[in-house]
Image: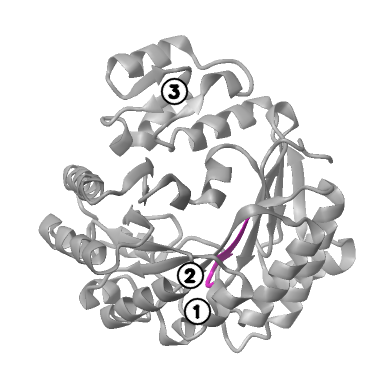
Amino acid sequence: MMADQDRQLGIYLHWPYCDVICPYCDFNVYRARNTDHRPLLDAILADLRFWRDQTGPRPLASLFFGGGTPSLLPPAAVSAVIEACATLWGFRPGAEISLEANPTDAETSRFADLAAAGVNRLSLGIQSFDDEHLKFLGRNHDGAAGYKAAGVALSHFEQVSLDFIYALPGQTVKQWLVELMCMIEDFAPDHVSPYQLTIEQGTAFARAVGRGAWTPVDQELAAEFFEVTGQMLSLKGYDAYEVSNHARARSTRSVHNQLYWRSQDWIGVGPGAHGRLGAGAGREATLCARKPGDYIAAVTTTGTGGVERSHLGLEAAREEYWMMGLRLLDGVPMIDAPGELLDARQLSGLIDMGYLQIADGRLALTAAGVPVADAVIRQLLV
């Protein structure tokens, strides 16, 4: 399949191994038990060559190392992937090469070499500076390690994004604001991604909540957390451009994540990785084998780790367009939407209730709609 040459293209690489599996995580992850990285890396490199034959010569807007914990990869392995992508596709000027990391000493010691390998944006999973909160979240680092890692990251990478989790049981809004203020005052990162704690099915937290071990914060308090988070970050010069993402400037917004939110193209490689290519009725979804061994076997026998490849169809492409695009606070152009326009009655009702607005041909959430974005979008697509 030849994708539209005018569309942006990125690569998502899923490295599935972690030293510990966090109790809130529902990603495709596995414990790293002295795992030899080479067989999986070789399979990923072969998969990239397969996809170059599919897409043709399109320069990459982004390369994202996600997981799992891709910072567990040796810097030489990260460099090999970057070099392969440069050879196969090439990068657009100013392309974003991003990698997720945790603030453990072992990973922090690799930051200089990862930057030298070509990573220009680090997404650092601080999650909290509070030791008790980190213990609750099942993290394998303390607050001091988080502080150290943030400082080291800022000294090595062109851009740094800090991730936090808030609205924890027992946490007060005041405690969270103090922590948020300390992060801003001490580090002033380019980008901040604060996420409310959510309970995902199949996770250890879901099982704990199910048996009554603890109770998540109620909706009213969660809404207060969300509101004060946005107010504080805005006051400090961070623009909220997506429901849970804030940047100091347009140039420091996540290029790769915007491919998802704007229904652009990306190739997914690595165990369990998803991909999307094309637009409208021609949009194609891909999914790689979830288990590392199965992924390696699939690449060995077929040349690719993708085990599912199908057209979304117009209705599914339309739903994805709105579900993802409306998370962007400047909205999405209605004229670009695949398929028929939205149901006029539902749209009118949500506008009248003050949750959505139309301006300059773009549909967007209002300030009132942002805290309940998922519910608004679901109702819009009924």
Q: CA distance from mark 2 to mark 1?
A: 8 Å
Classified by dominant secondary structure, the portion drawn in magenta counts as: strand
Left or right of 213 in this view: 21: right
Q: Name the image quarter holding the N terminus.
A: top right
Which of the numbered marks, if any, corresponds to residue 363? 3
Q: Earlier in the sequence, mark 2 or mark 1?
A: 1
- Give yes or no for contact between labels 2 and 1 (Cβ–Cβ under 8 Å): yes
The image position of residue 379, as x and y in percent, is 41, 25
| Range drawn in magenta | 62-69
- Magenta run includes residue 65: yes
Q: Which residue does the numbered mark 2 point to in the structure image? A: 157
Q: How is the image coloured?
A: one colour
User: Tag 2: Cα neighbours inside 10 Å, few (<14), some, or many (≥20)?
Assistant: some
Tell me which residue sits at (61%, 70%) in the image: 118
Q: Earlier in the sequence, mark 1 or mark 3?
A: 1
Left or right of 309 in this view: 379: left
Task: Tell me: residue 28, above or below residue 130.
Answer: above
Q: Earlier in the sequence, mark 2 or mark 3?
A: 2
Q: Nearer the viewer, residue 259 or 352?
A: 259
- Magenta run includes residue 25: no
Left or right of 302 in this view: 269: left
